[in-house]
Image (cartoon, rainbow, N blue to C red):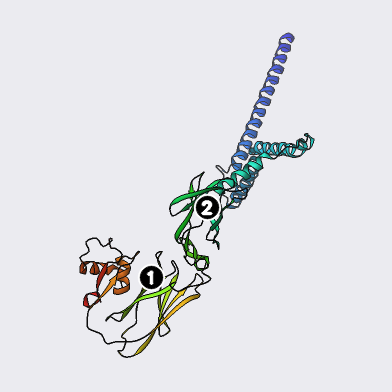
C-alpha cells in the first residue's frame, strides 16, 4: 500500500515537472514570436509599408527614410569612385617622380638640338614654298645696261626672263638675294622682265616693264606691273621733243572730242578743255594713246584751249601740250576717219569715238571688216558718228 503510494507520488512529481517544461517552452516560443512580430513591424514601418494612416507619423517616417537614403547614397557615391581616384593619385605621383626626381638624378648630356634645327628648317622650307620670286630693284644705268636685283629661296637657282626668253640664271645667296647685271647694252625699245625659280619651278607674280629710249637712260621708263596695278620704278628725268605728241584732234557732231598722239609707254595722259579735267588714258607699249571725252556743243567762232598732259607714276606732270583753236563751223558730214596704229583694236577706237567699246561692230560693218579682231597698222577706217552712233 505504502509502496503503491510512493510510486504514485513519484509519477505526479514527474508529470508536474514535464508540464513546467512545456509551459516554459511555450512561453519562450510566444516571446520569440512576439519579438519577431515587433521586429517585422519596425522593419515595415521603416520601409513605410503597411503603416497605419497617420499624417504626422508618415511625414516623420518619410523624412527619416529620405535622410537614410541620402546618407547611404553619399557614402555609396564616394565608395563607387574610390578606385578611379586612387588610380589618378598614383598617376600624378608617377608623373611628379618622372619630372623631378628622375630628371634631376639622370646624367646630363650636352648634344646639338637637332630637333629644333630640323623644325626651324622645315618651317623655313614651308614658307619658301609659297614665296614667289620678287623684284627689289630694276634700274637702267647711264650706259644703257639694266640691273635687276630680287630675292627668293636661299641657295637656289633663279632664271631671268626677258620678253619670254630666258637670258640668264643666277644663284641666290644664303639670304635668298640675287643680282643680274648683263654685260651687253639693251637696244632702245620695250622689254618685259619676269622671274622663274628653277627648283621648285615657280614663276613671279609680278613683271617689270622697261622702255629704253633712244635718247638715253634719262628719258627711259621702268614700271613694276602687279595684279593690283603698276608702280613707277624709274621715271624719265629729262624729256625731249617727241616724248609727247598730239597727232590729231577730232570734234564730232555728237559733242565728243577725240585726241590721238604719242608719248612715253605705260605712262598716263590726261585731257582738259579750258582747264576743265575731262579724263585720262594709258599710253600703249608702242607709245600710242587715244582719248575721247564728251565736251558738249562748242560754239563756232569761239576760241578754246585744249591741254594734253603726260604724268609720271606719282601723278606729277612731266610734259604738257596746250593747243588753242577757234571752233570752225560744222560741215554736216556724219563720218570721220581714223588711221589704225600699232596696238589699236576696234574696241578702244569705238570707245573713243562712239563712247562705248561694244559699238565696235558699227565700225566693222561700215568698213566691211569680216574679223573685228584683225585690223592692220595704217589701215584707214571710216567712223560713223551720226545717228547710229548716238
Say whether residue 244 is left or right of residue 60: left
Q: Residues within 10 Å of mark 2 (few under 14, many from 20)?
A: many
Q: Give the structural element (helix, strand or loop) at label 1.
A: strand
- Cα–Cα gap, marks 1 and 2: 32 Å
Could you say where residue 95 lies in the image, as x and y percent from the top left? 71, 38
Compare residues 40 and 82 and report the one nearer the observer: 82
Q: Extreme bottom residue here? A: 301
Q: Quadrant of the N terminus?
A: top right
> Regarding mark 2 in the picture, which secondary structure is present there?
loop
Give the camera-side residue of 181 and 351: 181
Q: Residue at point 21% right, 67% down?
A: 365
Side of 62 where 270 appears, left or right: left
**Mark nearer the viewer, 1 or 2:** 1
| Residue 202 falls left or right of residue 289 | right
Q: Residues within 10 Å of mark 1 (few under 14, many from 20)?
A: many
Q: Please give the residue where the numbered disc 1 appears in the rendered image.
A: 289
Whole-percent x, y for residue 264 in the image: 44, 69
In-front residue for pair 107/240:
240
- Residue 69 seen in this snapshot: no
Q: Residue at x 54, y 61 (%)?
A: 143
Specify whether 327 is left or right of 317.
Answer: left
To which residue does mark 2 refer? 133
Amino acid at each position: 500500500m505504502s509502496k503503491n503510494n510512493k510510486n504514485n507520488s513519484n509519477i505526479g512529481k514527474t508529470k508536474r515537472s514535464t508540464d513546467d517544461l512545456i509551459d516554459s517552452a511555450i512561453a519562450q516560443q510566444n516571446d520569440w514570436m512576439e519579438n519577431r512580430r515587433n521586429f517585422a513591424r519596425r522593419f515595415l514601418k521603416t520601409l513605410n509599408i503597411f503603416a497605419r494612416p497617420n499624417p504626422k507619423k508618415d511625414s516623420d517616417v518619410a523624412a527619416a527614410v529620405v535622410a537614410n537614403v541620402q546618407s547611404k547614397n553619399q557614402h555609396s557615391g564616394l565608395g563607387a569612385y574610390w578606385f578611379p581616384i586612387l588610380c589618378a593619385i598614383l598617376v600624378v605621383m608617377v608623373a611628379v617622380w618622372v619630372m623631378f626626381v628622375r630628371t634631376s638624378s639622370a646624367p646630363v648630356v650636352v648634344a646639338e638640338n637637332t630637333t629644333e634645327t630640323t623644325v626651324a628648317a622645315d618651317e623655313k622650307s614651308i614658307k619658301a614654298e609659297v614665296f614667289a620670286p620678287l623684284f627689289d630693284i630694276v634700274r637702267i644705268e647711264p650706259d644703257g645696261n639694266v640691273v635687276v636685283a630680287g630675292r627668293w629661296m636661299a641657295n637656289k637657282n633663279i632664271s631671268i626672263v626677258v620678253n619670254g626668253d630666258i637670258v640668264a640664271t643666277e644663284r641666290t645667296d644664303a639670304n635668298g638675294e640675287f643680282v643680274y647685271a648683263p654685260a651687253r647694252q639693251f637696244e632702245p625699245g620695250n622689254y618685259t622682265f619676269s622671274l622663274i625659280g628653277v627648283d621648285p619651278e615657280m614663276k613671279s607674280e609680278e613683271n617689270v616693264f622697261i622702255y629704253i629710249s633712244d635718247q638715253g637712260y634719262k628719258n627711259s621708263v621702268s614700271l613694276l606691273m602687279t595684279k593690283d596695278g603698276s608702280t613707277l620704278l624709274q621715271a624719265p628725268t629729262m624729256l625731249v621733243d617727241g616724248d609727247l605728241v598730239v597727232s590729231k584732234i577730232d570734234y564730232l557732231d555728237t559733242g565728243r572730242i577725240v585726241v590721238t598722239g604719242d608719248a612715253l609707254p605705260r605712262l598716263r595722259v590726261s585731257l582738259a578743255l579750258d582747264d576743265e579735267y575731262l579724263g585720262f588714258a594709258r599710253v600703249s607699249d608702242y607709245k600710242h594713246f587715244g582719248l575721247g571725252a564728251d565736251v558738249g556743243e562748242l560754239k563756232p567762232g569761239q576760241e578754246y584751249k585744249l591741254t594734253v598732259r603726260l604724268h609720271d607714276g606719282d601723278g606729277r606732270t612731266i610734259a604738257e601740250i596746250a593747243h588753242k583753236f577757234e571752233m570752225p563751223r560744222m560741215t554736216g558730214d556724219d563720218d570721220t576717219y581714223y588711221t589704225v596704229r600699232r596696238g589699236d583694236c576696234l574696241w578702244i577706237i569705238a570707245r573713243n569715238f562712239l563712247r562705248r567699246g561694244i559699238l565696235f561692230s558699227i565700225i566693222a560693218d561700215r568698213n566691211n571688216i569680216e574679223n573685228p579682231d584683225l585690223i592692220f597698222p595704217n589701215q584707214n577706217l571710216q567712223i560713223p558718228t551720226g545717228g547710229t552712233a548716238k
